[in-house]
Amino acid sequence: MKALIIGGGIGGMSAAAALKQQGIECEIFEAVKEIKPVGAALSIWSNGVKCMNHLGMGSIMDELGGPMHNMAYHDGLTGSVMTQFSLSPLVDAVGERPCPVSRADLQSQMIDWWGRDKVQFGKRIEKVEQSDTGVTAYFTDGTSAVGDFMIAADGTHSVVRADVIGYQTERRYADYVNWNGLVEIDESIAPADQWTTFVGEGKRVSIMPIADDRFYFFFDVPLPKGLAEDRSTVIADLTGYFAGWADPVQKLIAAINPETTNRIEIHDIEPFDTLVKGNIALLGDAAHSTTPDIGQGGCSALEDAVVLGQCFADQFKEKGKTVSGVLAALKQYEEERRFRVKDLVLKARKRCDVTHGKDMQETQAWYDELRQETGENIIAGLRTTIIGGPLA
Ligand code: FAD
């Protein structure tokens, strides 16, 4: 029984780990020769951390997770605290902590955990063929590979997606640009154990601690698509967009290294119901591409992987390691995941619009709510998202 895994990102590596737990051989094919992640860091929320533990990779979280124990919102212009609270009630309620991690380190350690020499780099799938008994992947270098089934975790620009769902998807611009990167921790910008966010004018500036005394930062600004801005203009751009904002924001802009700061126009994809066609399944961003506004894209890829493994365990018990067992497992995976992933994409889209001033009156109402917030409502929202996962 062999699976072809397309993509060596969080989705592909976690799917391989989950299938290995069910005694399935996996061949992993990654398009690039060297992985260069698009973002500096990720918050892996408690649902994602539980998945990493379940897949046997919990030690990676222990090593990379930053000490994010508190949360605060500040008025971006005055710098005054709108709300500040401990995340302990959340951790107590869900039984696991959130871990903000360096994205490059996470991907690298997941690949090392699997065995770097066992991942086939430089293999970009361009075509897939499926039959009743298996799948064939064709790569741009002229080679091909055959397996019993395929997990396509080839990201938001997935090549395999159209084969599975029957049409080409369009990416939807979310109307804002995100700059992100890492800086050394500086407590005059924000406390070292807190997720701190400055908000105002439909913009935000966020700072989270990751391991090795580093802050992950990001800036969001609602902007039209396609502006002529890049790394060479990043300091001037941010200085302009955040003119008049509080001192810690100005300090952060002065501290960042433009060479390692990413500028990303944020997109998502309208959710769809089909995640599986016969012996091919979509997983991670290939299956559900979200804006990062609730920090659940990577977490839901990890959830996909855990559920995938559970479905194989169920179906192999009933049908044995057979073709019909594989088809039933993939169908069960689709059934168990499609509502959850659609919900997360739409939740993130809604949060995105409120955060980024799509309707400034609604955004102002949110700022007003933040000033009354004790932490209870925010924690309740985070808790609902987390316990909706497979390991609640
Ligand atoms: P990817 O990480 O995109 O990996 C896909 C892999 O497939 C890549 O390595 C790629 O090279 C490879 N590939 C592509 N095409 C082919 C091909 N044709 N053949 C073979 N291989 C191919 N998520 C969170 O959980 N928390 C966060 O805080 C968070 N913050 C984010 C912030 C930003 C700015 C962004 C953009 C995203 C954020 N996300 C976050 C989302 C998260 O990054 C993604 O959901 C996650 O990386 C998806 O993993 P994946 O493996 O499905 O896709």
Image (cartoon, rainbow, N blue to C red):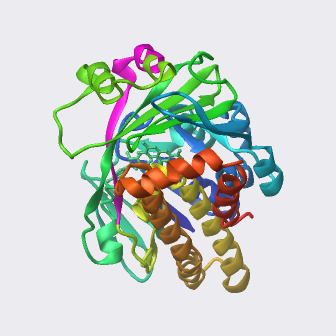
**Quarter of the image where the C terminus is located:** bottom right
Indicate whether 339 appears above or below 32.
below
Indicate whether 152 appears above or below 198.
below
Instruction: Please provide percent x and percent y for residue 199.
Output: 47, 39
Instruction: Please provide percent x and percent y for residue 13.
Output: 55, 50
- Pick whichever, 329 or 192, lies toward us: 192
- What residue lies at 35% left-to-right and 46% top-to-bottom? 31
Number of numbered discs: 0
Instruction: Please provide percent x and percent y for residue 42.
Output: 54, 40
**Quarter of the image where the N terminus is located:** bottom right
Instruction: Please provide percent x and percent y for residue 282.
Output: 44, 67
Query: Which residues fall within the magenta stretch?
Result: 251-269
- What residue lies at 36% left-to-right and 31% top-to-bottom? 262
Is residue 40 rendered to the left or right of residue 311?
Answer: left
- Pick whichever, 211 or 127, lies toward us: 211
* Residue 13 in sight: no
Is residue 252 rendered to the left or right of residue 190?
Answer: left
- Pick whichever, 65 or 143, lies toward us: 65
Indicate whether 339 appears above or below 73.
below
Q: Is residue 362 magenta?
A: no
Q: Quadrant of residue 317?
A: bottom right
Is residue 57 rendered to the left or right of residue 251?
Answer: right
* Residue 325 in sight: yes
Q: Is residue 254 magenta?
A: yes
- What residue lies at 34% left-to-right and 55% top-to-bottom? 358
